[in-house]
Image (spheres, grey):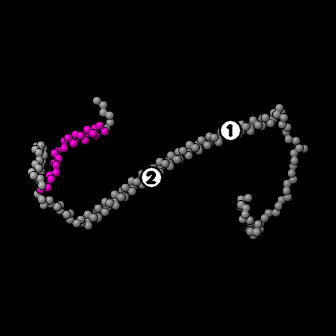
Amino acid sequence: MQYPNLSYFLWCGLFMSAALKSYVPQPVPTSVTQAQPRRFAARPTATVGVLRPLKAGAVKSLPVAPASSPLRRTLTQIHLVSSVLAASLVSLTLVGYGTSVYVDRQLDQATRRLSQLQRSEQQLTTSSAILTRHMAQQAEDPATGLQPPKPDQVIFLQPAPQRPAQTPADSSAGASFRADRPLGY
């Protein structure tokens, strides 16, 4: 026979432990109006004690524990503090481990993305060089109708006269500074 899972064994264990438990007595009513006192059934031989009905006022109170000593209180406080400290250290360790795993995954993804971008850059550089070479070959081909530049059709501009260099004293005057336009322009 094949058992479906672990829960089968757990249920069997529960039923077996319930079957093996000793006799559990029923509470005895203490009212005076009953005509006949209740008697207990015959017990199995495995029971250890005999149950007897209690008389009124026969309940004994438990003894009060003596005041704990200062040493015991100190040891209890040390135990509490060390337990909290140990729990804190375990939680910090778990947080640190989780953070390191997260950072490692993010770094791995960034490294993969970088290598992919570097491959794309190499491909773009290669394709740009191929396109430039192809355009140069097309420009040299006489069938395209392009003509080489001629000096008489080129416009040459005269360079502007050189301006005098500004001294730092001129720029520190602040008169030419305008706040309504960006500084980078």
Of badges 1 and 2, nearer the viewer stands: 2
Judge by depth and name the residue closer to the eye, 150 or 36: 36
Judge by depth and name the residue closer to the eye, 155 or 47: 47
Q: Is residue 65 left or right of residue 90?
A: left
Question: Whole-percent x and y of residue 36?
Answer: 9, 51
The residue positioned 80% from the left and 36% from the top of the image is 139
Judging by the rendered image, the residue that carries numbered circle 1 is 126
Disc number for residue 96:
2
Judge by depth and name the residue closer to the eye, 50 or 53: 53
Q: Which residues are magenta?
A: 7-32
The residue positioned 28% from the left and 38% from the top of the image is 9
Rendered image quadrant of residue 4: top left
| Kind of element beneath mark 2 | helix
* Count of residue discs: 2
Q: Is residue 9 above or below residue 92?
A: above
Q: Is residue 44 left or right of residue 167?
A: left
- The quarter of the image holding the C terminus is bottom right
Q: Earlier in the sequence, mark 1 or mark 2?
A: 2
Disc number for residue 61:
none
In the picture as drawn, the residue positioned furthest to the left comes out as: 36
The residue positioned 20% from the left and 65% from the top of the image is 66
- The quarter of the image holding the N terminus is top left
Q: Is residue 121 shown in magenta?
A: no
In the picture as drawn, the residue positioned furthest to the top comes out as: 1
Tags 1 and 2 in contact by the CB under 8 Å rule? no
For label 1, count other residues whose C-alpha is less than 10 Å away and answer few (under 14), some (14-19) or many (20+): few
Q: Is residue 17 shown in magenta?
A: yes
In the picture as drawn, the residue positioned furthest to the right comes out as: 152
Residue type marked 1: Thr
Q: Could you tell me if residue 26 is visible in this image?
A: yes
Question: Whole-percent x and y of residue 81?
Answer: 34, 61
